[in-house]
């Protein structure tokens, strides 16, 4: 029987339209589902919309329409946007659907039958935006402000049904102690542990102050607490229209860190109370950080949301969607906060995609119209084969660990090795000397690596993967349950197959086009920013102070230089490979050739800025990081002792 994989996004609350923040989570889920399908898993991908609650009722009243009409309108926009971003969910659940109502009421009845729901009275501070109660200690003072929405919490007094959350404190702690931990990353697991260890109180799970919700079985005066309703979708979606409960439990539930408590405490406790044994609880909830824009969390009130579809279409009508998917998965370490930048998108389009990937294809295909015979291989080919094996294995390990960022870093290390191979193997020289055997070996070796890369990038860039395969004379990828397509070694090509060289997959963007994109998608300026007077140049100032949060966004690590060589015709540049603790060494082009010979650097422990936007030096020289150096003489900062490669610098 093939392995199964069930991945979910949070269902999105319909008080807002789809934007880049919601796209980030959905694209990540789609990437993970596509990867598992390539590995032969029978997979299921769920997303949807959360449509009940006081906030929606008030919004509908303000617009003079019914809550159901508002839900129909906004939910349709979410359903429509995902295919436009290359996302292919298998199901789209709405909490206003009859199938969901029936299954949620059944879940309530199971818990009530077990004695874990009882009637009482509640008085507390309630944030309508969060649909959650807070204690005064959890709110910002003065004013009892919600820490997320910065609006005053409302004092609510009402009769309420309660869930015996306190009963499940020890069992939850035992659940978190499983290996591998069902809460990731480790920093989020620590937050959840701290919350539970501080003591759990019973949870109010019904409301009488509004009606837009699912009625409590046997007591229609009450509607269910919106989070009891919403969290249940992950199960209710498997019950109809067809019984797909074979996919239960979820192997991966992706959520934003702001809803961690609901998904890692309340959700599991509800399932425990409904009678689910530990082996039928969600295997892993992975909480990613906030995707910010211009330094702020995206929201309507800040006027800083970005339409992901508009952005993708503006970049390119053919590969814009895949470009956006790549940049979201590559630029921001999954699990951490990250700031979105149109400048970063344009830089990666040019360097990572245009030069490292697209240009490699363009450097190979002009040398043959069909796959040539492959002659004897030598050290250069063996080196590239080893780089492919290492990158493919590391990429698979990273995807399995829900780290698309590291997976792409590993895959791009294969591309870096392939581009270096072209430089050293020099197919143009073999052609000039009429050495058809050597030329065939070079070309076929590269065709095989490119075929492997086309498979490895497919979870993130499915359209680009098939476009590359078309030029390589290959059929589009088709996943098959039980059949693992992951290329741990490059696939062998038979001689004689036709190649179909086409237009560049990533055509160069004109400078004017880049300027227009930056102007169109730049974040709004802060209202309190002080601009220079007309005709006045900005004054030169010392660097402004940074916050601790600014500093923690820098990914500084100890790196060990494993190889170094001079860049031809570039007197100041060295081409380095630096071990930073990832599966493959990082390529860094450093302007320190006047201060060091290559031999002086090999083995040094240096400090590397790892999340710097890649810099393209031309002719395939793309630097993916920066060494820290001091003074005009460019003396690199080194680390004493034997700190391991990848150790964080704090």
Image (spheres, rainbow, N blue to C red):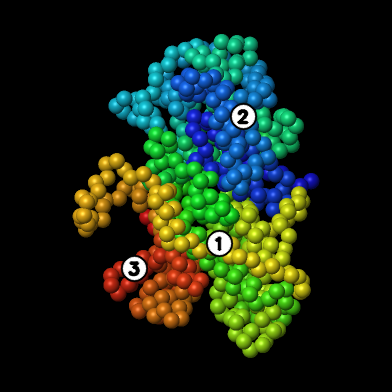
Residue 229 lies, in percent from the top left, at 58, 25
Q: Earlier in the sequence, mark 1 or mark 2?
A: 2
Name the residue rendered at 66%, 81% in the picture: 439
Disc 1 is placed on an element classified as loop
Left or right: 113 as drawn, with respect to 350? right
Q: Looking at the rendered structure, which numbered label has been put on residue 94?
A: 2
From this viewpoint, which residue is outermost toward the right? 1
Q: Earlier in the sequence, mark 3 or mark 1?
A: 1
Mark 2 → mark 3, Cα distance in angstroms: 54 Å
Disc 2 is placed on an element classified as strand
Instruction: Look at the picture and state if 627 lies above or below 437.
Output: above
Instruction: Look at the picture and state if 251 lies above or below 345.
Output: above
Q: For residue 446, what is the image quadrant?
A: bottom right
Of the two numbered discs 2 and 3 in the rendering, the one whose residue sits closer to the viewer:
2
Q: For residue 238, what is the image quadrant?
A: top right
Mark 3 → mark 1, Cα distance in angstroms: 34 Å
Name the residue rendered at 48%, 61% in the picture: 509
Left or right: 413 as drawn, with respect to 90? left
Of the two numbered discs 1 and 2 in the rendering, the one whose residue sits closer to the viewer:
1
Q: Identify residue for label 3.
A: 629
Residue 3 lies, in percent from the top left, at 73, 46
Instruction: Look at the picture and state if 500 lies above or below 259.
Output: below
Instruction: Look at the picture and state if 330 lies above or below 182.
Output: below
Residue 486 lies, in percent from the top left, at 69, 58
Q: Identify residue for label 1.
A: 506
Name the residue rendered at 21%, 50% in the picture: 533
Residue 106 lies, in percent from the top left, at 67, 21
Left or right: 99 as drawn, with respect to 359? right
């Amino acid at each position: 029987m093939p392995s199964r994989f069930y991945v979910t996004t949070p269902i999105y609350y319909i008080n807002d339209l789809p934007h880049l923040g919601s796209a980030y989570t959905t694209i990540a889920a789609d990437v993970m589902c596509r990867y598992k399908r390539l590995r032969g898993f029978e997979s299921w991908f769920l997303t949807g919309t959360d449509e009940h609650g006081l906030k929606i009722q008030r919004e509908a009243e303000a617009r003079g329409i019914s809550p159901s009409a508002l839900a129909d309108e906004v939910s349709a926009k979410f359903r429509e946007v995902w295919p436009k971003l290359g996302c292919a969910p298998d199901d789209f659940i709405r909490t206003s659907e009859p199938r969901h109502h029936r299954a949620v009421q059944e879940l309530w009845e199971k818990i009530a039958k077990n004695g874990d729901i009882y009637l009482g009275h509640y008085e507390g501070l309630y944030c309508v935006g969060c649909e959650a109660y807070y204690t005064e200690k959890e709110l910002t003072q003065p004013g009892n402000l919600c820490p997320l929405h910065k609006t005053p919490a409302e004092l609510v007094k009402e009769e309420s049904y309660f869930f015996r959350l306190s009963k499940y404190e020890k069992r939850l702690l035992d659940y978190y102690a499983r290996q591998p931990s069902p809460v990731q990353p480790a920093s989020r697991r620590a937050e959840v542990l701290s919350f539970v260890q501080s003591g759990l109180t019973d949870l109010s799970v019904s409301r009488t102050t509004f009606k837009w919700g699912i009625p409590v079985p046997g007591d229609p005066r009450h509607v269910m607490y919106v989070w009891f309703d919403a969290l249940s979708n992950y199960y209710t979606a498997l019950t109809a229209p067809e019984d797909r409960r074979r996919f239960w439990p979820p192997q991966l539930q992706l959520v934003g860190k702001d809803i961690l408590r609901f998904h890692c405490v309340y959700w599991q406790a509800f399932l425990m109370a409904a009678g689910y044994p530990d082996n039928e609880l969600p295997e892993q909830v992975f909480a990613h950080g906030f995707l910010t824009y211009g330094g702020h969390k995206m929201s309507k009130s800040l006027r800083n949301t970005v339409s992901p579809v508009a952005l993708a279409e503006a970049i390119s009508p053919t590969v814009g969607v895949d470009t956006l998917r790549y940049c979201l998965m590559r630029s921001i370490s999954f699990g951490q906060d990250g700031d979105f930048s149109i400048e970063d998108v344009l830089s990666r389009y040019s360097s990572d995609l245009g030069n490292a990937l697209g240009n490699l294809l363009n450097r190979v295909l002009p040398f043959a119209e069909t796959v040539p015979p492959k002659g004897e291989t030598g050290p250069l080919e063996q080196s590239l084969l080893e780089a492919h094996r290492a990158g493919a294995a590391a990429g698979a390990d990273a995807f399995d660990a829900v780290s698309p960022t590291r997976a792409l870093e590993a895959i791009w290390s294969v591309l870096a090795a392939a581009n270096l191979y072209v430089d050293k193997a020099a197919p143009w020289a073999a052609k000039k000397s009429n050495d058809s055997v050597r030329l065939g070996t070079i070309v076929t070796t590269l065709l095989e690596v490119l075929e492997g890369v086309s498979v490895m990038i497919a979870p993130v860039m499915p359209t680009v993967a098939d476009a590359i395969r078309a030029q390589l004379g290959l059929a589009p990828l088709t996943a098959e349950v039980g059949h693992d397509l992951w290329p741990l070694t490059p696939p062998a090509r038979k001689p004689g197959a036709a190649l179909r060289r086409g237009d560049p997959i990533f055509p160069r963007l004109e400078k004017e086009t880049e300027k227009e994109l930056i102007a169109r998608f730049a974040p709004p300026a802060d209202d309190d920013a002080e601009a220079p007077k007309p005709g006045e140049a900005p004054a030169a100032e010392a660097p402004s102070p940074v916050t601790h949060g600014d500093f923690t966004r820098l990914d500084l690590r100890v790196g060990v230089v494993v190889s170094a060589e001079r860049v031809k015709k570039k007197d100041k540049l060295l081409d380095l490979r630096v071990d930073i603790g990832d599966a493959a060494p990082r390529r860094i082009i450093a302007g320190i050739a006047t201060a060091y010979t290559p031999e002086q650097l090999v083995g040094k422990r240096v400090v590397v800025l790892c999340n710097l936007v890649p810099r393209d030096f031309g002719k395939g020289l793309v630097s993916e990081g920066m060494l820290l150096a001091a003074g005009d003489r460019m003396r690199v900062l080194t680390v004493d002792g034997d700190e391991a490669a990848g150790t964080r610098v704090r």
